[in-house]
Image (cartoon, rainbow, N blue to C red):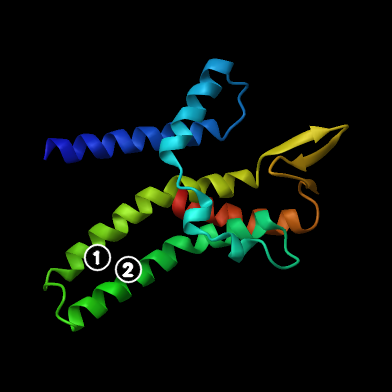
Amino acid sequence: SNFSINTKILINHVQFLMLASFFDFGWSSGFNSFFQVISNFSLVDDNLWIPPCMVNNGSTKRIYRTVALSSLSPIFLIIISSTAWKIGQSAKIVSSQTKALNTTMVSILLTLVYPSILESSFAMFRCVSIDGTSFLRADMSIECWVGDHSFWTLFVALPSVIVWGV
């Protein structure tokens, strides 16, 4: 239907605008304010789909655990959704249209978390230079492209951007 098509187009535009805000192109204060408003509608709160208890423990920095969990979250969503639908089908709670309904549900869930996945991955590339040394904007205790940051960026964040962003 036209409503469905228009809704998909609107969601795609909002997500595109959110992705544009991830890059620091020296946006004017008006654009930054606009991006802030858009982010309220396009990002799923990380605490909603990655519980704080999963990222606040351990010796690995929080940002690294967040990017790892968000990169794997689409796989988890597909497995959980498929399992739930299979259980429902075997208990005869859902109809034989399970595959179509499962695909629709996974598509909706992925559309909701897509901007958050890319935001956490792109955060690994956002560095700020202070006195000639680059630090990760999301965690200023992490020096960019040194040690763990290089590993997590090249082997977790970059593949996440390539797989889920392209």
The answer to whether 124 is drawn above or below residue 14 in the figure is below
Q: Position of residue 133 (x, y in %)?
A: 85, 38
Distance CA(mark 1)–CA(mark 2): 7 Å
* Callout 1 secondary element: helix
Q: Residue furthest toward the right? A: 131
Front residue of 22 and 42: 42
The mark total stands at 2
Q: Position of residue 72 (x, y in %)?
A: 50, 63
Residue position marked by numbered label 1 in the rendering: 102
Q: Position of residue 24 (x, y in %)?
A: 62, 29
Residue position marked by numbered label 2 in the rendering: 81
Report the amino acid beneath label 2: Ser
Mark found first going from the N terminus, 1 or 2 = 2
Residue in the image at 16% along x and 76% along y:
93
State left or right for residue 91 relative to residue 136.
left
State left or right for residue 165 relative to residue 56.
left
Q: Position of residue 114 (x, y in %)?
A: 43, 49
Q: Are marks 1 and 2 in contact (CB under 8 Å)?
A: yes
- Is residue 153 at least partly visible in the picture? yes
Report the amino acid beneath label 1: Asn
Residue in the image at 25% along x and 73% along y:
85
Q: Residue furthest toward the bottom? A: 90
- Estimate how packed mark 1 is, as few (under 14), some (14 to 19) or many (20 or more) residues with alpha carbons within 10 Å: some
Front residue of 108 and 166: 108
Looking at the rendered image, the quarter that the N terminus falls into is top left
- Is residue 28 at least partly visible in the picture? no
The answer to whether 114 is drawn above or below residue 1 in the figure is below
Residue in the image at 52% along x and 59% along y:
50
Q: Quadrant of residue 75?
A: bottom left
